[in-house]
Amino acid sequence: MSTTGPVESVSTLCDGAVSGDVRRWLRLEGLIVVAAAVLVYARGGNSWLLFGILFLSPDLSFAGYLRGPRVGAAIYNIFHSYIVPIALACGMWMAGRSIEIPLIWVAHIGFDRLLGYGLKYPTGFGHTHLGKLG
């Protein structure tokens, strides 16, 4: 059976990071997520000052790396996964509360993905699901 495009090496596929077209799709997904979150935030008439102040706040999770790469990766991944902010937004929305903070959080994650910053492996900060940093 022949293929019609470049085939990734076994070592690339086994290191746990995506590459090629899949990586480009995930980064494009990040662009769409950040754009959608910012659009919904803007339509809500929310504070841009608050957005600016909180946009980088998930990066405070870097402090987890002071406890080592395994703990650091776990804490970073909790704060850089869509699961928590989307669950929080759903709960807040159902309670009739503003979802501006979860929207800022989702925008941050989408922006990180767009830039190629992925979820971390416990082998080191630079080892992500979107490839090695640096």
Image (tube, rainbow, N blue to C red):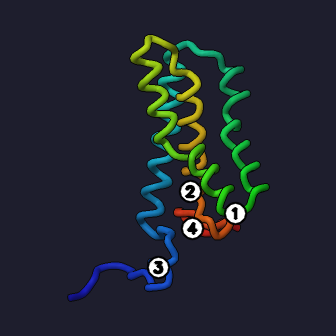
- Nearest to viewer (mark 1 / mark 3): 1
Q: Secondary structure at mark 1?
A: helix
**Type of residue at label 2?**
Leu
Task: Give the vertical position of 111 relative to 132 (above or below).
Answer: above
Q: Going 51% across and 34% down the picture, which residue do you hit?
A: 85
Task: Determine crowd level at label 3: few under 14, some 14-19, many 20+ residues with C-alpha closer than 10 A.
Answer: few
Q: Secondary structure at mark 3?
A: helix
Mark closest to the chain's N terminus, 1 or 2: 1
* Dot 2 and dot 3 residues touching (CB under 8 Å): no
Mark closest to the chain's N terminus, 4 or 1: 1
Mark closest to the chain's N terminus, 3 or 4: 3
Q: Which residue is mark 4?
A: 131
State which quarter of the image contains the C terminus: bottom right
Q: Secondary structure at mark 2?
A: loop
**Residue furthest bottom as drawn:** 1
Q: Spatial distance from mark 2 to mark 3, Cα to Cα?
A: 16 Å
Task: Determine crowd level at label 2: few under 14, some 14-19, many 20+ residues with C-alpha closer than 10 A.
Answer: many
Mark closest to the chain's N terminus, 2 or 3: 3
Q: Which residue is mark 2?
A: 119
